[in-house]
């Protein structure tokens, strides 16, 4: 960061945040593309019995499941399968924060740091998408769908925890941790300046 105080840095972060939020909103479909690929890979490997495929439409990932509609019974299956739409922006809102922090720091290699940060965030964002999908089929889409999953009580609890963790904690904490690890010297300088 150029010479200045902690307060100046915070003002720069807020100024950059306004810009990065705008770019993130406009580019969310493009930024969601790798998450869609990872979510499809994970769902095909780990959830093959529940998921037929995953498709991306803009910033929404649609999971097409093997589950029947809520009106299905063991005796008579409904005609269609259940699909679930997940808005990727729920899990990527930390990306503009990371970008604002990197740009406000003014350190060299900003473009490289942005790409590295984005790549590091991808698995955590994918976690959120998969966790929301599992939360939806485990109960959010109704008991008729949930009963077809075969999830036990402890599995539903683990899914609920993963969903809360992937929605509330990871999108906000991981970008800050990534930035701190990338800019330790800047933080040390800011803390020395504040203590002087």
Image (spheres, helix red, strand yellow):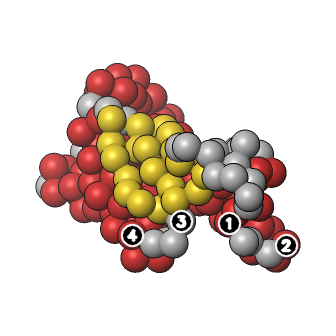
Q: Looking at the rendering, which quadrant does residue 155 occupy?
A: bottom right
Judge the density around disc 4: few (<14), some (14-19), many (≥20) Cα neighbours within 10 Å. some
Judge the density around disc 2: few (<14), some (14-19), many (≥20) Cα neighbours within 10 Å. few
**Label 1 residue SS:** helix
Q: Position of residue 28 (x, y in %)?
A: 33, 34
Q: Which mark is residue 44?
A: 4
**In-front residue for pair 23/40:** 40
Q: Earlier in the sequence, mark 1 or mark 3?
A: 3
Q: Which mark is residue 50?
A: 3
Cα distance, mark 4 to mark 3? 9 Å
Write down the residue under mark 2. Answer: 153
**In-front residue for pair 77/131:** 77
**Label 2 residue SS:** helix
- Given the current orientation, which residue lies at the most extreme front position? 75
Q: Is there CB contact under 8 Å for labels 2 and 4?
A: no
Q: Is residue 107 left or right of 177 when viewed as pictured?
A: left
In this rendering, does residue 25 appear at all? yes
Q: Earlier in the sequence, mark 2 or mark 4?
A: 4
Write down the residue under mark 1. Answer: 149
> Residue at 32% of width from left, 32% of height from top?
58
Judge the density around disc 1: few (<14), some (14-19), many (≥20) Cα neighbours within 10 Å. some
- Given the current orientation, which residue lies at the most extreme right position? 153
């Amino acid at each position: 960061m150029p010479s200045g105080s902690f307060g100046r840095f915070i003002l720069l972060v807020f100024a950059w945040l306004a810009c990065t939020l705008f770019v993130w909103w406009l580019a969310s479909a493009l930024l969601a593309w790798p998450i869609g690929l990872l979510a499809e890979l994970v769902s095909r490997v780990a959830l093959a019995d529940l998921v037929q495929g995953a498709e991306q439409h803009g910033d929404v990932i649609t999971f097409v499941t093997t589950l029947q509609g809520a009106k299905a019974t063991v005796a008579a299956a409904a005609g269609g399968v259940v699909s679930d739409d997940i808005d990727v922006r729920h899990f990527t809102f930390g990306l503009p924060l990371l970008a604002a922090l990197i740009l406000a720091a003014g350190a060299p290699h900003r473009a490289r740091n942005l790409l590295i940060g984005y790549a590091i965030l991808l698995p955590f964002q994918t976690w959120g998408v998969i966790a929301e999908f599992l939360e939806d089929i485990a109960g959010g889409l109704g008991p008729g769908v949930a009963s077809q999953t075969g999830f036990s009580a402890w599995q539903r609890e683990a899914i609920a925890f993963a969903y809360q963790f992937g929605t509330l904690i990871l999108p906000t904490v991981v970008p800050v941790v990534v930035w701190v690890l990338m800019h330790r010297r800047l933080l040390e300088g800011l803390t020395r300046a504040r203590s002087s």
